[in-house]
Image (cartoon, rainbow, N blue to C red):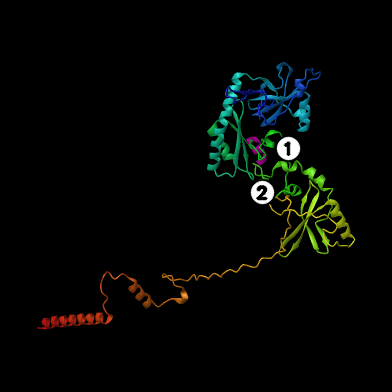
Amino acid sequence: MGCVGCTVSKNGESGGCSGGCSTGGCNRLNTYDWLSDMELEDVAPFDIVEVSFKNGSRKAFYRNHEYIKTITGDWVIVETGTGFDIGVISLSGELVRLQMKKKRVNEDAVLYKILRKANERDLERLQEAREMEIPTMIRARAISRSLDLDMKIGDVEYQGDVRKATFYYTADGRVDFRELIRHFAREFRVKVEMRQIGARQESARIGGIGSCGRELCCSTWLTDFKSVSTTAARYQNLAINQAKLSGQCGRLKCCLNYELDTYLDALDHFPERAEKLFTQMGIAVLFKTDIFKGIMFYTFEHENGRGKIYALNLEQVRAIKKMNDKGEKPADLGEGIPVQIVSTDPDDENAEMDFEDVTGAIELPDEKRKKKRKKNKNRDRGGNEGNNRKPSTEAKQEKSENRPSNNRPDKPRQEGRDGQAAKNEARRKKNRGRDNRKKE
């Protein structure tokens, strides 16, 4: 989202912010100093101003002396105790007093002051420091990963004089980063400050576009983060889908709390303890509540599922509830009451149907399915089941029969045995002849 101070190139593309914004950025925690635009002289000027750093990601209060003559929108050099930093004045005058009261900051706690206005060389040095932040963050993540630390470095901010760097990280618990600081000081040659932030603060510093198409609320105007629970989604009849209800920070979206008070006020007009209505046909259970139209949907539960869905207004529900309190039961929810049957399609729950819902009225016959044979895990290599195994001789015979014959005629088994016996007899005769010759 652009501002008055954003420059535009010849091609129509944005050339960046020229410094005219009240916070030094386009849409990051902007504040409008409307008193400074009025041509009125302040009789008792307030000597404290609000200074914004890094496009509004961090703000602080500093004392402004009269001889410096700075106004809202000026780039100034401020002292930090470890050097100096460069920022832009976002608020001045009586609005700062109200801002300090909102943030509960005491005037005596403001110790540092503005030194002077920033010149072109100071702004060039600040730009060089901003260009060093992303490479530093990438290198810092690699070092923390090499030390096996359970933490994530989300952002790095250099001081205007490039003497100090603040590392913002997120972690589930306490992290012993004493060794990590030594590595950072040796690698980057600056004074290191580690600051732990939450997941929502990290998302606010990084920024982004939400599912609504607008910039994240936490990075544009939201400063106080209130707890969000799934109860807020239930009151608003939202589906409990963690993927759709979570923001970019991984937590529940802060916008779930925006309209919660309106829904709670509307629910006060609905009858209490009306989850079940007793009739002669059975017990009607509350299915859905349309808060905007003031309609409550009931259905009779059967063994085969849900039956008709009845849409009753608040007066009809109160009338039936009053009869139940007296011990009376109406014949049906539709007795003397106009009944509206609505679609049960999950994609279009509010669409009306021109036909009757016969859910549970028609029963389809059970489908006959063939039983699958249970496969026996104990199988031999041939693929036969363990209970139907064949003897080894038969398996060998089948193997021999299935082997290729190589174009050789099969010989009868008996002929093979006679031939082997003849060979053995000839061998014995030969051995006898050798023994007789040795004796001679």
Task: Find disc 1 in the rendering and name its residue.
Answer: 224
Residue type beneath disc 2: Gln
Please rate how many residues cluster around mark 1, counting C-alpha atoms within 10 Å: few if below 14, some from 14 to 19, many from 20: few
Residue drawn where x is 58% and y is 37% of the image: 181
Q: Position of residue 416 (x, y in %)?
A: 25, 79
The chief SS type of the magenta part is: helix
Please rate how many residues cluster around mark 2, counting C-alpha atoms within 10 Å: few if below 14, some from 14 to 19, many from 20: few
Start and end of the magenta stretch? 198-206
Q: Position of residue 282 (x, y in %)?
A: 80, 63
Task: Find disc 2 in the rendering and name its residue.
Answer: 242
The reply, left or right, for residue 253 in relation to residue 428 is right
From the image, which quarter does the C terminus lie in?
bottom left
For residue 198, say whether it is visible: no
> Residue 9 lies in what quarter of the image?
top right
Q: Can you say whether 24 is above or below 395 in the image?
A: above
Q: Nearer the viewer, residue 176 or 387?
A: 387
